[in-house]
Amino acid sequence: MAMALAFFLLVSPVAFADIQQTKYLAVNLNPGTVLNAVEDAGSLRQCALRCPQQSCDSAASPCCTLFCWSKTSLACYVQTTSRPYRQLLPSAVGFRCFVKEKLSHAVALGYQMIRGQCVKVYEEKKKWSDAQRRCGADGGHLYYFKTLDTAEPVINDVTGTLAAPTGRYWVGASQTQMATYRWGDGTLLALNTSVWMSGEPSDTGGNEECMEVVTEDLNDIWFDKTASPLSRLNDFTCDTVSHFICQVDV
Ligand SMILES: [Ca+2]
């Protein structure tokens, strides 16, 4: 069961421009928010300095998306784009948390920071192209990923917040020409990669050009629960209305 991860209420802007090039804004986080490292820090300033200051524009280097510090326990929690550890914020009380300024707009729209990625699953259902437009209006795009080992915990956590999940979500990949599939950033989605479910992409009827992630098969006849890593990608008809996952780049 995914934790309740939602942010709530951005509060007064407090920037750390004096010690970092990147500004952070104060934010309240729910307990159980997934962060990925905890260290001791004697001050809020020291905690802020534990955030790697690299630009998030480079996938090769880690960047810090948010951090929290407790004056009581002197614990410093950080969330970066690269650290694999899973730490849960133990309490909303006594912690001062800060999110990267660039992401504060998305956070105010209900986006969550999960494993260093800024994502939101929509309860409403839309066609793939309308879903892409909805994400674009938020300043983002349909969620895309390159490997399931990094995407799977993000997908599980964000979709776990839905009241009535269907197990099928539009993501940012499509068939750009016959038998050629690309992620939303234009990179090739290879046919032999393990992200595909068994027998997919099937392009059934020559009419399946948009990609969905399948997390469960409610009819229990199609989804291979034993596959490891779980293979989750399916091509499907673009006009089907479905839940969808948006992402704002960090
Ligand atoms: Ca298919």
Image: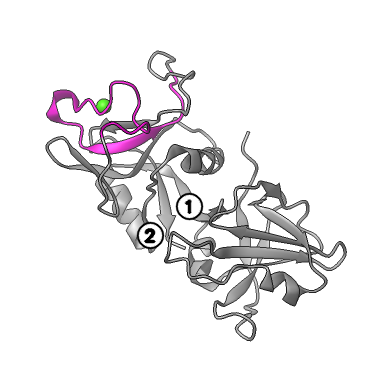
**Mark 1–mark 2 contact, CB under 8 Å?**
no
Per the image, the residue denoted by label 2 is 140
Asked whether, in this view, residue 148 is left or right of residue 191, the answer is right
Asked whether, in this view, residue 204 is left or right of residue 112, the answer is left
Residue at screen point 48% across, 52% down: 119
Q: Which percent across, then down, holds residue 10?
A: 61, 68
Residue at screen point 56% across, 51% down: 114
**Viewport quadrant of the N terminus:** top right
Q: Residues within 10 Å of mark 1 (few under 14, many from 20)?
A: many
Question: Is residue 228 inside the magenta stretch?
Answer: no
Ligand 1 position by quadrant: top left
Per the image, the residue denoted by label 1 is 119
Q: Residue flagged by tag 1: what amino acid is it?
A: Val
Direction bottom: furthest residue: 18
Q: CA distance from mark 1 to mark 2?
A: 9 Å
Disc 1 element: strand
Q: Residue flagged by tag 2: what amino acid is it?
A: Gly
The dominant secondary structure in magenta is: loop
Asked whether, in this view, residue 145 is left or right of residue 64, the answer is left
Disc 2 element: loop
Q: Which percent across, then down, holds residue 175?
A: 20, 40
Q: Which residues are magenta?
A: 191-218
Q: Is residue 122 above or below residue 7?
A: above
In which quadrant of the rendered view does residue 242 lie?
top left
Asked whether, in this view, residue 88 is left or right of residue 160, the answer is right
